[in-house]
Amino acid sequence: MSDFKDQVTHSGLDDAPRKGHRILGIDMARSLAIFFMVIENYKNAMEADGKGPGWLVWFFSHIEGRAAPAFVTIMGAGLALLAHKALESGDSALRRDSTLRIIKRGVFLVVLGIFNYQVWPGDILHFYGFYMVLCALFLFRPSWTSLAAAALVMIVACFINRIFDNKIGWENGHIWYNGYLTPGGFVRNTFLNGYHPVFPWTAYALVGMWLARQPVFEKEGRRRCLLIFIPITLLFEFAMTFPGFLRFFRHPDMGVAFADGMLRFLTVEPDLIVMSARQLVAISAILVCLELADRFRTSRIINALATTGRMSLTHYLAHTTLVLGPMLILDILQQDRMTSFLISCGFFAAAVTFSVLYSRRYTLGPLEALMRRVTG
């Protein structure tokens, strides 16, 4: 496929079965996930935890820990769409080719993530690549197997946290991981106790695969899902604002040992309640973006966001190497909340502008085109 743009009316997914505005919603969701990840990453990298305007403190507190799960869930949905043609055809050769292509792209992202880690220890790309490889095993299975696999991943994560010391590698604080570039350190960081370890984070991607195979791209099916997920998500988010909500699970007093044990189990690592809440936010955000793209398919804003989302890999790497890297070298990384927020907004505005202008000539972003050339 040529990198030069003829006319793009849908997302950059090669084999997307549903063209037009419905796929715009996936790309729009991806771009917003990148935006909120940039805000959170810049806040953490710049140690911007001091005082600030009340509205900004509130904003940071309500996006924290939500953008990355959404990003991974969207990735899972994208994989399901990418493999849809092979799934529908029943052609075993086409299925093997699709699986191999996704595995190769996963390996590409692992290598790219190792490079990015040298600038930003919170890198998600090297984890992302492993999520893709594991998800490839379930691409052509019934959709319920994705949920079953997500549950299995969570069970394994719970088991790991019972027998493994999560402090290994973080002896000098949660900034740089000791021994990351050694075989043992890399495996520990990637699978067990890094920022976004394969166990349990692959569960988000598997749920995304399941979601993309539900009738969420059809108006009636999507709106039924909205009526289910939005109220549950809001209820969870509201409940989580009360300190006593999680305290009840951590220190239950039901008078029945088994019941108390089960309640405590929901909040021990990997904290099933919090992960469920984050997953609900991700699903709801995807559904809302699909609905908005459906209703306002000709909107320049939505199309600009969708164009940005198609270049998410390029923008993710750019937000570390072009901003955090130079700031680290110049020793100006530490900033206050407002400054980190303004830098985040400035970067995203530049990313949107670049995407719109670049897409007038090219279909794929620079790194997306490189990945296509390397992996097929």
Image: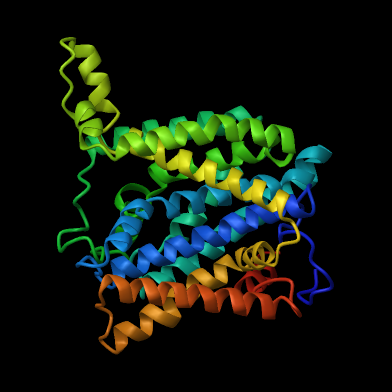
Examine the image and state in which quarter residue 189 appears. bottom left
Q: Where is residue 317 in the image (x, y as percent from the top left)?
A: 49, 72
Q: Is residue 342 above or below residue 96?
A: below
* Residue at (34% x, 33% y) in the render: 273
Q: Is residue 375 above or below residue 241?
A: below
Give the mark count. Answer: 0
Identify the image's colour scheme: rainbow, by chain, secondary structure or one colour. Answer: rainbow
Q: Position of residue 266 (x, y in %)?
A: 30, 28
* Residue at (71% x, 57% y) in the render: 13
- Position of the C terminus, as image quadrant, is bottom right
Q: In this view, does 279 lie to the left or right of 193?
A: right
Residue that sits furthest to the bottom in the current view = 330
Query: In the image shown, does 121 or 180 lie closer to the viewer?
Result: 121
Residue that sits furthest to the front in the current view = 54
Residue 197 visible in the displayed image: yes
Q: Where is residue 38 in the image (x, y as percent from the top left)?
A: 43, 67
Residue that sits furthest to the top in the current view = 256
Examine the image and state in which quarter residue 373 appears. bottom right
Q: In this view, does 331 lie above or below 295?
A: below
Residue 214 visible in the displayed image: no
Query: In the image shown, does 101 or 72 lie closer to the viewer?
Result: 72
* Residue at (36% x, 62% y) in the render: 40
Q: Is residue 170 left or right of residue 87?
A: left
Q: Is residue 128 left or right of residue 15?
A: left
Q: Position of residue 354 (x, y in %)?
A: 61, 79
- Position of the N terminus, as image quadrant, is bottom right
Q: In this view, does 335 lie above or below 40?
A: below
Query: In the image shown, does 192 or 260 lie closer to the viewer?
Result: 260
Query: In the image shown, does 39 or 146 lie closer to the viewer?
Result: 39
* Residue at (61% x, 63% y) in the render: 309
